[in-house]
């Protein structure tokens, strides 16, 4: 068996285990009853990307975006996250003088202490 196939198989198994675990957590949370607190939220955000030097961009690249969340139960929520960034680029494959980055992801978020004002959380997702 080639090492490339082995690494691909390991990644598939890891992703399958993460999806199965997230599904079990979400399923058990849905059985817990109706959630308390806001049913959904919209949170603006910002940050910075450090793209590879091969992209012809000077570090860092500012970004903006946000989170759209939907609470399923007290400790579990579904979240959609997105960020957009644009920067001058000298790389020919950037498709012009600007490099545009668009990132989106979907997550299942597990709030570890949902009854406190500030709570740590774990996020499982893809994107």
Image (cartoon, grey):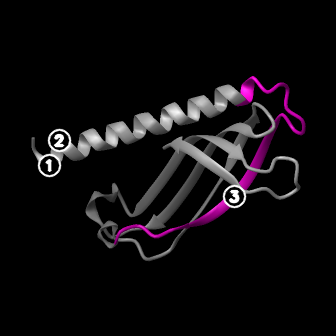
Quadrant of residue 116 within the rendered picture: bottom right
Decide which of tag 3 and tag 2 comes sooner along the chain: 2
Q: Find disc 3 in the rendering and name its residue.
A: 45
Quadrant of residue 31 within the rendered picture: top right
Q: Quadrant of the N terminus?
A: top left
| Residue 13 vs residue 87, the one in the foreground | 13
Q: Find disc 1 in the rendering and name its residue.
A: 3
Q: Nearer the viewer, mark 1 or mark 3?
A: 1
Q: Which mark is residue 12?
A: none
Q: Find disc 2 in the rendering and name its residue.
A: 5
What percent of the width, then of the height, locates residue 19? Answer: 49, 34
* 107 with respect to 121 (left or right): left
Task: Answer few, some or many: residues within 10 Å of disc 1's Cα (few below 14, many 20 plus, some between 14 and 19).
Answer: few
Measured in 3D between alpha carbons, the distance from the residue under mark 3 to the one under mark 2, in whole angstroms, is 38 Å
Quadrant of residue 96 within the rendered picture: bottom left
At x 71% / y 37%, what residue is drawn?
77
Task: Give SS at disc 2.
Answer: helix
* 84 with respect to 42 (left or right): left
**Over which residues does the magenta segment extend?**
29-52
* 50 with respect to 111 (left or right): left
């Amino acid at each position: 068996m080639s090492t490339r196939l082995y690494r691909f198989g390991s990644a598939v198994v890891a992703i399958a285990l993460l999806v199965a675990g997230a599904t079990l957590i979400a399923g058990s949370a849905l059985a817990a009853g109706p959630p308390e607190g806001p049913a959904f939220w919209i949170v603006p955000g910002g940050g910075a990307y450090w793209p590879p030097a091969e992209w012809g961009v000077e570090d860092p690249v500012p970004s903006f975006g946000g989170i759209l969340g939907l609470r399923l139960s007290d400790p579990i929520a579904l979240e959609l996250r997105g960020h957009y960034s644009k920067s001058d680029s000298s790389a020919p494959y950037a498709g012009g003088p600007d490099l545009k980055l668009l990132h989106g992801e979907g997550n299942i978020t597990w709030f570890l202490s949902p009854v406190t004002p500030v709570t740590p959380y774990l996020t499982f997702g893809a994107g």
